[in-house]
Each structure stands twice: as C-alpha cells, then as structure tokens.
Image: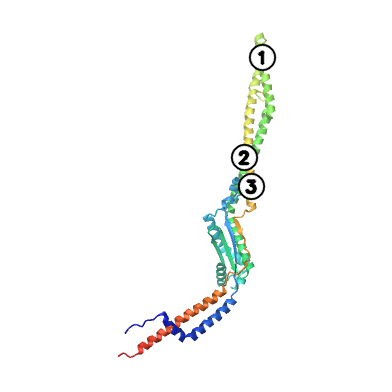
Amino acid sequence: MSESSYSLLGLWPIINRWKKPVGTAVLLALVVSTIVALILPNIYKSTAVFFPTNPQTTDPDRVATEGSKLDLNGRTEDLDRIITIGQSQPVADLIIKRFHLYERYEVGQPGDEKADNEVLREFSSNLDIVHNERDAIELTFQDKDKQFAARIANTLVQVIDSINQRLTLENRRNVLGLYQQNYQFLDDEFEKTRQQLLGARRRYGIYGIYGMEQQSRYLAREILKVQSELGQALGSGADARRVAGLRRALRNLTHNSGEDNVMNLESFTQGIDSVNLLTLRMTDLQERLIIARGDYETADLAIRGKLSSLYIVQKAYPATKKSKPVRWLIVVGSVFLTLVLSLVVVTLLELWRRNSRTLKRPTS
C-alpha cells in the first residue's frame, strides 16, 4: 500500500470545509481579545538614571587631604554594590511599608506568609535595576499610576543612597575619632610644653630674645670687668683678701655655685639651651596642632554634611505615555494564534478521518 502524500495546497479544501468553525473561532478570539485588551489597565514606567561615586572620595581621611571631590568613575564593585542594595529585601520591605503596597496590590494583610510572598513578588516584578552601556545605573519602576511610579523610583534612589552611605559611616566615625584623639593629644602636649617653657624662663630669668641679648651683654661686661680688676690686683701686688674676693666674684659669674648665685654664665647657658629647646618644641607642636585641628574640623564637616554617594543624572518623572499593554498587538496576536491552532486542529481531524477510512476499506 502506497503512502498518501500531503502538501500545503491540500489545506485549502480542508479550510473550505471547516471555514465556519474556523471563522467562528477566529471571530470569538477577536471579540474576547478586544474586550480583554480594553479591560487591561495602562501601565506607566518611570526611570531614574544615576552614577555611583567612589565611597573612598567621601571618607574623612581623604577629604581632609584631597578635598571633597567626587569620583564618578563607574567601578565594577561600586555598580554591583548599588544594584545589590536596590534588589535587597530590606529595601523592598521599607518601600512596601512606606507606600502601603499590601493594600495597593490587594494581596492581604501584613504578617501572612502568602501575602508577604505575593507583595514581594509583585514589587520585584515592577522593579528593574540595570547597568547600562554607559556605566550608569537605570532604576525603573512601573505602576498603573504614573505619579506613584515616579515617587517610588525617586524614593528608591534615596534609600539606596542612604544605605550606601551607612555602609561606610562607622568607618568614617572611627577615622573622625582618630583625628579627635590626635588633636587632643597635641593640644595637651602644647599646653604642657608651654607651662614648661614658662617655668624655665622663671627659673633662669630669661624672657624673650631681647632679654637674652641684654643678659648676655651684662654677663660679658661683668666678667671682663672682674677679670680686668683681678689682673690689676695681681699686677699691683694687692692684698690677698682683695685678690680672693675678685677670684670668688669671677667664679660666681662663670659657675653656678649656689642658690644665691642667680646670674652666672653656666646657668645662663643652660637656661638658653632649655628655653630654645622648649621654644622649638612648642613651635613644632603649634604647627602640628593647627593642622590636626583643621583635619578634625574638615572630617567632622564631611560627616555632618552627608555627602551623597550617588550622582543623579536624571530623576524619575511621570511618564508621558503608557508602556503597556499594546492593545492592537494583543488582538492581532490572539487572532493569529487562534487561526493557526484552528488550522492545526482541523488538519489533524482530516488526517485522522482519512486514515480511519483507509483502515476500514477491504483489501482485495
């Protein structure tokens, strides 16, 4: 028995015999799809576009030394971090509670496991966060209300920015504490050195540059005077008491021989060394203290200022036209799909009938 051959041309008689059922199915699909397309609500999309900044450029330790400049380089880790934050469940829970999405999506009451899963699924299906080809992040939210979609998209950007800042906030506070400790230490050391310098000036009687010059001239003049008188006394054969007195006076002028000997060369030299050393240390501490105070104030300002970790290129605005549904496409697609399925069904029925008649035909 030879196999029966079939071709596309053989479909036309089949379609002609089944034109009423096929036409009825196509017409019914046209009516139903039109009604469904008209019933479906309009969905609007709102998109915010922003760049993540490098969090290191807003840290106090870098702000103090490099200035408060924002690095807009789209590093992979920054982009991944922002997208991960935006898709995290804590962010979703916060938006769901803030905008009362349980009631809006009509999924039930909070606390019910089924309602929680359904509202989270609906929220996630309406949210889209992608990294585009320009190394920016596009955050899109869709809803039946264009104003509502824009509000949620902008709020999501704010929440992501807040959480992203919070990730480094503790480290910033630790760095600020180090700046404060350094400033406090230098301030205490400066005050201690100042008191030591004041004590050294009182002890050695040295006050200022001009005081040291006058005292050095006085000592030099007195030492030369006593030496001259001692030389004259020794040359003239003066009595031993006068010579001994001049020797004692010269020694008192050059050596620190007791508490009553206040002004002498040895004590004066030691005093100059101490005063100069303390003066240099206090000058160094003063310079370091000024720098430390400036660094601390800059770091404190950086934290209080709460520099944004995102550079927003475009806020989310209410859409000017709907994004879906495409009603004509729904109708055309439904009609075409119904027509194809109808043709497949009637073709299979015709093949089944033909095969059945062939099997029932008696063989010779």
Residue under the point 67% across and 26% down: 212
Query: Could you say where residue 132 lies in the image, as x and y percent from the top left?
Result: 54, 60
User: Foreground residue, 188 or 237?
Assistant: 188
Q: Which mark is residue 288?
A: 2
Tell me if 312 is positioned left or right of 341 in this view: right
Residue farthest to the front, as pictured: 9
In the rendered view, tell whether residue 8 sits above or below residue 202: below
**Few, some or many C-alpha atoms within 10 Å of disc 1 (few <14, some 14-19, many ≥20)?**
few
- Secondary structure at badge 3 equals helix
CA distance for labels 3 and 2: 15 Å
Q: Amino acid at mark 1?
A: Ser
Q: Are marks 3 and 2 in contact (CB under 8 Å)?
A: no
Whether residue 205 appears in this view of the structure is no
Query: Could you say where residue 18 lies in the image, as x and y percent from the top left?
Result: 47, 86
Q: Amino acid at mark 3?
A: Thr
In the rendered view, tell whether residue 327 sits above or below residue 266: below
Whether residue 194 appears in this view of the structure is yes
Q: Quadrant of the N terminus?
A: bottom left
Nearer to us: label 2 or label 1: 2
Disc with the residue nearer the chain's start (3 vs 1): 1
Residue farthest to the top, as pictured: 237
Q: Which residue is mark 1?
A: 228
Disc with the residue nearer the chain's start (2 vs 1): 1
